[in-house]
Amino acid sequence: MVVPREEGERARRSLASLGMLRRGLRIEDGDGTLLLPVKDEVSIGYPLKIHEFKEMSQRPRSYRELLEVPEELRPLLPRAHDIVGDVLILKIHEELASFEEAIGSALLKATKSVATVAVDEGVSGHRRRRTLRVIIGRRSTRTVHREYGLKLAMDPSQVYFSPRMAGERRRVAQGVRTGEVIIDAFCGVGPFALHMARQGAGVVYAVDVNPSAIEFLRENVRRNHLENVAPIQGDVRKVLPYLEPADRVVLDFPKSPLPHFTLAASTLKEGGILHYYEILERDSLEERLEDLSSALPRGLAMELLGSREVRGYSPSQGHYALDLKISTG
Ligand SMILES: C[S@@+](CC[C@H](N)C(=O)[O-])C[C@H]1O[C@@H](n2cnc3c(N)ncnc32)[C@H](O)[C@@H]1O
């Protein structure tokens, strides 16, 4: 379709809303006119012309540019996804169920270094396992994720992992001093533990109840050539009482950390630091600090060194990080 250049955007939108714009072909610029690729004969007030369009050679800005779905469903297309290694994980609205494969295929073409696209059907159970359903690409979701130079082998359908915590893990690791004794109480495949070990910790005891997480952690210790991580498979309630007093404890069980707080605090040396994570209503931070203060073992007091919302969780909730110094009161 031949359109005066200044009317190009309006015509492109009209064609798109009629479902007549041919995606994946490059719009061409002529002498004061644009050539828009159309699927079939269509009349919106501009002449049609037979033309050999070129395929879009550059990677499109968004997978949406490659996707043919009815215009009324476009607003439901996924806007966010996670990439873990070469696995792209996303949620798809149920009204788009019959377009899953097309969405997967467009994402594969549009996203660099992705080999598998999987639908996230939710996290469940205390092991926080995610149900993933591969819609296109390699069937296995086992992969190696890179995070600030660390190699993290994992299968996100077997273990919990969120790439969105990368910055927070690096921040915590940067505070570690050489030789510290550290406990990573809910370690998953060990990203906190490995970052802190690389930073020079004396030893990081990394505990998780999920045997697959600990198996991957052992592999990750080898892959990153570290020797100061001690992976322990078990329940923190049974394991922590047997560990040596720590300079620092990471308590990353944000759905329900409070029942573990007293034990974690009593595992610290005098003046040790507890990195506490919880998903909280945005206006409930003060209240939670009071709860924590009352849950401290007798004779201990805490000082809030810092707090931040690491990421939004829902319109009213945030995933919070609290850095607490625990000392005798
Ligand atoms: C939010 S994930 C931790 C993620 C990890 N810190 C990271 O940065 O990737 C919580 C972990 O706690 C583990 N878990 C749950 N209950 C536990 C318990 N009682 N003792 C030890 N680990 C537990 C789960 O298996 C899961 O790996």
Image: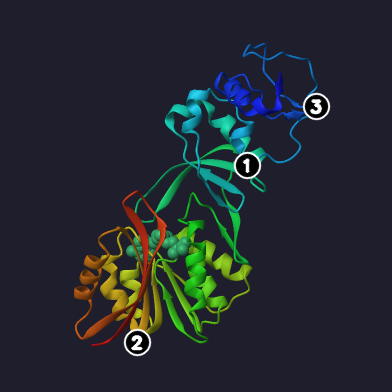
Q: In the rendered image, which residue does mark 2 sit on? A: 271
Quarter of the image for the N terminus: give it: top right
Q: Nearer the viewer, mark 1 or mark 2?
A: 2
Q: In the rendered image, which residue does mark 1 sit on? A: 138
Circle 2: residue type: Gly
Circle 3: residue type: Asp
SS state under label 2: strand
Circle 1: residue type: Arg
Q: Nearer the viewer, residue 271 or 22?
A: 22
First in sequence, mark 3 or 2: give its number: 3
The circle on residue 31 is 3
7 is higher (above) or lower (below) than 285: above
Horizontal side, residue 193 vs residue 251: left or right: right
Whether pointer 1 and pointer 2 mark residues with C-beta atoms closer than 8 Å, the reply is: no
First in sequence, mark 1 or 2: give its number: 1
Whether pointer 3 and pointer 1 mark residues with C-beta atoms closer than 8 Å, the reply is: no
Q: Residue at 58% of width from left, 21% of height from top?
A: 14
Residue 225, x across and y down, in percent: 63, 74
